[in-house]
Image: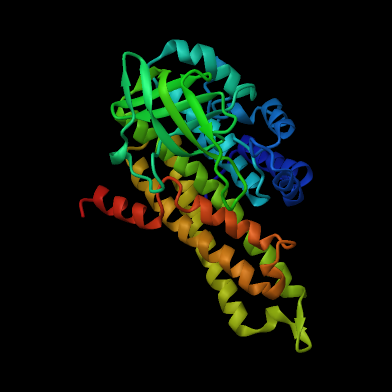
């Protein structure tokens, strides 16, 4: 487990309190039922911007706090506990792409707006249902970008796209040459298909920047998955302690105790590898890619286990829409393949280690 400083502890506790009071699961249900096009509550996003969370990984000279990825991961973890729908996990790596990029004009024009929550920025990387940076076909000629991106988080309303092309990352702003197609997925969040047809694009960097930014996006997604898994476990544990069958609480049955113990140990391992990946990013270590692949592989399998057990151990009520268990399982099914599923990252980890 990461050792947090006082600022990180305060940030985590603040995020937990805000999520519980202002963005509980009931808020997500209302958002889902309202079928909001953007997939998130603009008022809640404005509050997040005012609290400074949008600028956690933005350099101080551009209005951010530069607290680092572990700090941002702590916030996203707490939001993930309640399935809070926000663009924070998208804007963070998009801001990093600009900050690490070669365009000083882009930094000046966009980073302060991202930090304040004024602008929603997102990554447009994959071009199919399976994450594979080797299959990117988007091209840029004469400053105009052409290609189609699938499953772009917050793509329905984002004002700024960080787009992966064959030769690296580009920045696309505005609506010129941009066509959005809404996708309906199980988690009721925004995963739009974006078609670029001669969209004006500004170069940020080469393929090495693409890989670095995707690793950061994957690490933040792991933080959200950790929060989801922790909450799913806690809710299930509380249920087993209060639900009585055959005259005694379910928690007294040894078979169920074994299942809960299995999940608990997997969650401890998941926390260890997720926080290690975020710390590796902040430390600028050379093995960030390995740390991220380990976290995503372990995290994906753990969240799948815990979310499914949540449904099963709640019995019949867990199968209904009225209970929250299904919401966690649906979100888990969507995030597990994002930025590569467990099988992808196990293979990647092996290749990075020479196997």
Kindly indicate the quadrant of the structure image that contains residue 259. bottom right
- Residue 42 versus residue 156: which sits nearer the camera? 156
Instruction: Return the x and y of residue 75 as percentages of the image width and height.
Output: 62, 40
Identify which residue is drawn at 45% across, 27% down. Answer: 162
**How many numbered discs sit on the rendered protein?**
0
Question: From the viewer's perspective, is residue 323 above or below residue 245?
Answer: above
Q: Residue at (56%, 47%) from the top-left corner?
A: 224
- Which residue lies at the image location 47% right of the left edge and 56% below the top edge? 300
Residue 62 in sight: yes
Q: Nearer the viewer, residue 181 or 55?
A: 181
Give the vertical position of 47 relative to 288 (above or below): above
Residue 339 placed where, x, y %? 42, 45
From the viewer's perspective, tell me whether residue 262 is left or right of residue 40: left
Q: Is residue 334 left or right of residue 48?
A: left
Q: Residue 190 in the image: state x and y as whole percent.
A: 58, 40
Q: Quadrant of the C terminus?
A: bottom left
Q: Is residue 281 left or right of residue 17?
A: left
Residue 285: image x %, image y %?
36, 37
Q: Can residue 229 be seen by looking at this rendering? A: no
Question: What residue is at 61 percent from the left and 78 percent from the top?
Answer: 257
Check the image and name the residue furthest to the left: 354
* In the displayed structure image, the side of residue 142 where residue 243 appears, left or right: right
The color scheme shown is rainbow
Image quadrant assignment for residue 215: top left
- The answer to whether 353 is drawn above or below residue 199 in the figure is below
């Amino acid at each position: 487990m990461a050792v947090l400083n006082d600022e990180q502890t305060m940030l985590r506790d603040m995020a937990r309190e805000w999520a519980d009071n202002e963005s509980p699961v009931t808020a997500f249900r209302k958002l889902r039922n309202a079928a909001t096009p953007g997939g998130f509550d603009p008022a809640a996003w404005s509050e997040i911007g005012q609290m400074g969370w949008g600028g956690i990984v933005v350099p101080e000279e551009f209005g951010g706090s530069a607290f680092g990825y572990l700090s941002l991961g702590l916030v996203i973890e707490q939001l993930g506990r309640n399935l809070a729908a926000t663009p924070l996990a998208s804007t963070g790596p998009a801001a990093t792409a600009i900050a690490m990029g070669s365009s000083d004009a882009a930094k000046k024009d966009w980073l302060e707006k991202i930090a304040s929550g004024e602008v929603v920025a997102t990554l447009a990387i994959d071009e199919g249902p399976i994450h594979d940076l080797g299959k990117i076909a988007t091209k840029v000629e004469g400053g105009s970008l052409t290609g189609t991106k699938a499953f772009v988080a917050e793509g329905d309303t984002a004002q700024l796209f960080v787009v992966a092309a064959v030769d690296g990352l580009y920045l696309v702003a505005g609506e010129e040459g941009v066509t959005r197609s809404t996708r309906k997925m199980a988690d009721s969040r925004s995963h739009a298909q974006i078609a670029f047809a001669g969209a004006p694009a500004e170069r940020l960097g080469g393929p090495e920047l693409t890989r670095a930014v995707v690793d950061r996006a994957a690490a933040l997604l792991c933080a959200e998955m950790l929060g989801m898994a922790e909450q799913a476990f806690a809710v299930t544990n509380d249920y087993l302690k209060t639900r009585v069958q055959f005259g005694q609480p379910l928690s007294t049955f040894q078979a169920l105790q074994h299942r809960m113990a299995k999940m608990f140990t997997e969650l401890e391992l998941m926390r260890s590898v997720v926080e290690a990946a975020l710390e590796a990013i902040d430390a600028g270590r050379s093995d960030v890619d390995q740390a991220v692949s380990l976290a995503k592989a372990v995290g994906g399998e753990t969240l799948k286990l815990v979310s499914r057990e949540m449904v099963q151990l709640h019995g019949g009520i867990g199968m209904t829409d009225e209970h929250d268990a299904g919401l966690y399982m649906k979100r888990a099914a969507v995030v597990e393949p994002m930025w590569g599923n467990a099988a992808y990252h196990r293979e990647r980890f092996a290749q990075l280690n020479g196997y």
